[in-house]
Image: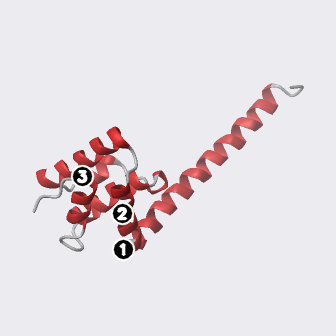
């Protein structure tokens, strides 16, 4: 049976071969599209994949570029969130770390502006 929606086809692949790098990559792709806070790099997603899984990733990317978030993406995303809490924990840690760096940069920029323009 062929699934016509790219997100549901990706979800079908994510449900197969438990514990493999292919499964992990499909989940990372779905989560990245589902919520930008759950971002994983495209190289991290594609590196372990064979042609079949890579084609599924490209189909999901194309669907997202054309239609953005859809109900099918929400279905796939919710399944990944519910079934891969450690992946969410990892994504949260990466997002929090990036936020801390941006916050530090903002404070450094503000200090530099006060130094350069003390009367401003």
Q: Earlier in the sequence, mark 1 or mark 2?
A: 2
Secondary structure under the numbered disc 2 in the rendered image: helix
Counting residues from the N terminus, which is met first, the one under dot 3 or under dot 2? 3
Colour scheme in the image?
A: secondary structure
Q: Is residue 114 above or below residue 37?
A: above
- Name which residue lies at 23% across and 46% down: 59
Q: Residue at x 90, y 25 (%)?
A: 119
Task: Place residue 72 in its image quadrant.
Answer: bottom left
Q: Which mark is residue 75?
A: 2
Number of dots carrying numbers: 3
- Residue shown at 28% from the left, 64% from the top: 24
Residue situated furthest left in the rendering: 1
Q: Closer to the observer: label 1 or label 3?
A: 3
The front one of 109 and 48 is: 48
Q: Quadrant of the N terminus?
A: bottom left
Find disc 3 in the rendering and name its residue.
6
Distance of label 3 from label 2 (alpha carbons): 12 Å
Label 3: few (<14), some (14–19) or many (≥20) C-alpha neighbours in 10 Å: many
Q: Secondary structure at mark 1?
A: helix
Disc 1 versus disc 2: distance between alpha carbons?
Answer: 12 Å
Q: Which residue is mark 1?
A: 83
Q: In the image, residue 97 lies at what x, y percent?
A: 55, 56
Which image quadrant: the C terminus? top right
Say whether disc 1 or disc 3 marks the residue closer to the N-terminus.
3
Q: Residue at x 18, y 71 (%)?
A: 17
Q: Nearer the viewer, mark 1 or mark 2?
A: 2
Residue 66, quarter of the rendered image: top left
């Amino acid at each position: 049976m062929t699934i016509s929606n790219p997100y549901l086809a990706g979800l079908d692949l994510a449900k197969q071969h438990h514990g493999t790098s292919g499964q992990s990559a499909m989940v990372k792709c779905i989560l990245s599209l589902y919520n930008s806070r759950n971002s994983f790099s495209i190289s991290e997603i594609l590196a372990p994949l064979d042609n079949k899984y890579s084609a599924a990733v490209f189909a999901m990317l194309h669907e997202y570029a054309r239609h953005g978030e859809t109900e099918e993406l929400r279905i796939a995303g919710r399944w990944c969130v519910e079934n891969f809490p450690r992946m969410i924990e990892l994504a949260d840690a990466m997002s929090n770390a990036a936020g801390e760096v941006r916050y530090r940069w903002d404070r450094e920029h503000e200090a530099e502006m006060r130094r350069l323009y003390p009367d401003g």
